[in-house]
Image (spheres, grey):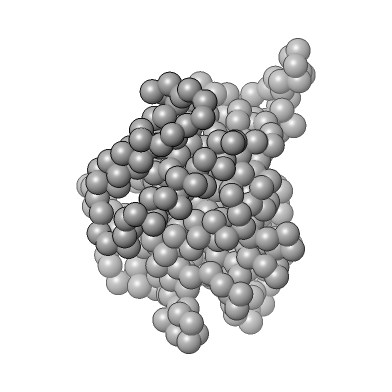
Amino acid sequence: MGLDEIVKQLKQLIQSKFDLSVSLTDVQLQEIIEQEVFSYPFQDYMTAGQRHQLVMRLFHSFRGLDVLQPLVDDPSVTEIMINRHDRIFIEQEGRVTLTEVAFESREKLEDVIQAIVAKVNRAVNESSPIVDARLLDGSRVNVVLPPIALEGPAMTIRKFPERPLTLDDLIHNGALSQEGAEFLKKLVLAKYNLFIGGGTGSGKTTFLNALSQFIPQEERLITIEDSAELQIRTVPNLVRMETRNANTEGKGEITIRDLIRSSLRMRPNRIVVGEVRGAEALDMLAAMNTGHDGSLSTGHANSTSDMLSRLETMVLSGAELPVKVVRKQICSAIDVMIHLTRLRDRSRRVTEISEIIGVENGEVQLNPLFIFVERGEEEGGKVVGELVPTGNRLQHTSKLEMAGIPL
């Protein structure tokens, strides 16, 4: 008899003997499982270590994430992609591989999905088949159910490190240069409004976390996210807010726009919007323009100029304004754009830091301050390059001067 069949039999045995719907502590449940595993008449010899692994597998099937739990607990795994219950891929060190791990059935995967979304007060079903959620450790979760997902429920889990990376870590990893990091540190301290752009998986949230470590501890910070992912631990006066989906009756939805407007009445020194995707860009720009200097946000784009175009489109989706007015809003709200790229060797790099200097002939003008220069490739395909200053100087220096910070 195979191990999967033994697990199935033991689960049925435990469920038939004990009422698991009653309130059992984790310790009590584990004791019940151990009792059954160590008394089970295995045909083949099993060591104490193998039996312990079996106990934990059963425990995770009842209380944890079932077969996903070891992957979630493995620090080397950065992303888990469940295409269907028996096709699970993982990313390790930037490489994606198919695992031998599989749920016992589609129904078990559905149970795990429902348990995940319920813990963060979300719902996913046939009428609302797409949802963003998170695990208790902050890992990002996206779920797509049939009929949208054609081969059964699909789920993607993006994990974040237990300890947020610092700019020093990013320098060590080659994500940016020491000079670039020092420059950005000064901008954060001087309360420049920064916007981080980049493609999917380029490290925008990680980078925002790293920059937030330079926000002075005496300031009051409000974070606004669609699904809470930020790991800001250096600011004591912190309020974290998360959106809420509508209930089954279509009521009770709380959007990012709602939260930005509410945050303005909470006496923030700075506002951090985890990611802008739509009409909330207008509210974010308005907040930056009304005395909340030092605010930060992120967005999806392939380049800095593309990010500016996307911001225009987002604002226009929320209000009928002349394009000229929108561009002026962007210029007066955002001081510096930072762009991150995931290179062909899967490394994540800061590839551009540019200042927004104004509108000329109807177009937003950029002043590139740092750009990534590629030097070649090492053996194995590793990209060699660095973030270097362009020679252009920061034109808008008034915030640095007011803060008494030399450039």
Q: Report the number of discs.
A: 0
**In the depicted view, which residue is nearer to us: 11 or 359?**
11
Q: Is residue 237 visible?
A: yes
Q: Name above or below for residue 222 compared with residue 71.
A: below
Rendered residue at 30%/72% (across/down): 265
**In the depicted view, which residue is nearer to us: 405 or 165?**
165
**In the depicted view, which residue is nearer to us: 114 or 361?**
114
Picture quadrant of residue 209? top left
Rendered residue at 57%/24% (across/down): 174
Outermost residue on the top side: it is: 379
State the image coordinates of residue 404 (x, y, percent, origin top left): 33, 38
**In-image side of 184 versus 322 (left or right):** left
**In-image side of 375 versus 352 (left or right):** right
**In the depicted view, which residue is nearer to us: 209 or 18?**
18
Rendered residue at 38%/61% (across/down): 119
State the image coordinates of residue 141 (x, y, percent, origin top left): 52, 54
Q: Is residue 193 visible?
A: no
Q: Name above or below for residue 263 compared with residue 159.
A: below
Rendered residue at 42%/64% (across/down): 118
Picture quadrant of residue 390? top right
**In-image side of 168 versus 265 (left or right):** right
Q: Which of the image's four quarters has the N terminus?
A: top right
Q: Which of the image's four quarters has the C terminus?
A: top left
State the image coordinates of residue 15 (x, y, percent, origin top left): 39, 55
State the image coordinates of residue 26 (x, y, percent, origin top left): 28, 46
Q: Name above or below for residue 172 compared with residue 290.
A: above
